[in-house]
Amino acid sequence: MDKTQLRARGKKILSELNPEDKKRIEHSFYLHLFKSDIWKKAISIGVTVSQESEWNTEPIIRQAWDENKFTVVPKCEPKSKRLDFYKLDDFDQLETVYFGLKEPDPTKTEPLKKSQIDLLIVPGLIYDRHGFRVGFGGGYYDRFLENYEGETVSLAASNQIVETIPKDEFDIPVNHLITEEGFLY
């Protein structure tokens, strides 16, 4: 399968999950993540603000706040296909942009440098066992991950894992993958 087919497969997997299964899988993600050393060591957590069809990141953001960690969320710059991360202290600091995405409002918060993010939770649709992923197609995260030195982790149900993914020279794997069963690596 090529990346376009894998992307469609990943979207289908997420859209067809019934609400009870989705909540059960998400709950296992959170348990494994919050017990992990990479979470415990991190002072700043980078994470997207999820849309309805994605794995829910609100509990991750709230847990980070409860533990007095910095939470930073990305703002996409479509012309340059760049991500800039902004500190998020309250959901009121978000604005709705294109395609209904929730992103930080730069007038209500402050940017953080890439080097200030300890743990980045990288979204995706399909993964292989080596940390390579098929995302939503913009290449934003691969650009951001270039020269990123912090830890990276993705959350994926076991049916989002495939044997191999076609790789391009700019694809950067995540360090860790959490499934409902725990850390895959």
Image (tube, rainbow, N blue to C red):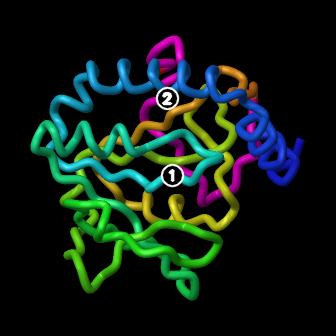
Give the residue type that dot 2 points to.
Answer: Leu
Q: CA distance from mark 1 to mark 2?
A: 18 Å
Give the prevailing secondary structure in the magenta stretch: loop
Q: Nearer the viewer, residue 176 or 24?
A: 24
Task: Judge left or right: residue 172 versus residue 65.
Answer: right
The answer to if 172 sits in the magenta stretch is yes
Identify the secondary structure beneath mark 1.
Answer: loop
Give the residue type that dot 1 points to.
Answer: Ser
Q: Position of residue 53 (x, y in %)?
A: 65, 46
The answer to if 158 sits in the magenta stretch is no
Query: Where residue 59 is drawn, which disc sits there?
Result: none
Q: Nearer the viewer, residue 17 or 81?
A: 17
Query: Where residue 50 is drawn, which disc sits there?
Result: 1
Q: To which residue does mark 2 refer? A: 177
* Residue at image coords 24%, 53%: 71
Identify the secondary structure beneath mark 2.
Answer: strand
Q: What is the span of residues highlighted in magenta in the rendered image? A: 164-184
The vertical placement of 94 against 53, above or below, is below
Picture quadrant of residue 85: bottom left
Q: Nearer the viewer, residue 16 or 71?
A: 16
Question: Which of marks 2 and 1 precedes in the sequence?
Answer: 1
Q: Position of residue 90 (x, y in %)?
A: 24, 61
Q: Nearer the viewer, residue 72 or 167?
A: 72
Picture quadrant of residue 145: bottom left
Dot 1, how many residues are within 10 Å of its Cα: few (below 14), some (14-19), or many (20+)? Answer: some
Q: Position of residue 18 (x, y in %)?
A: 71, 27
* Outermost top residue: 181
Image quarter (top left, top right, bottom left or bottom right) of the N terminus? top right
* Residue at image coords 31%, 46%: 61
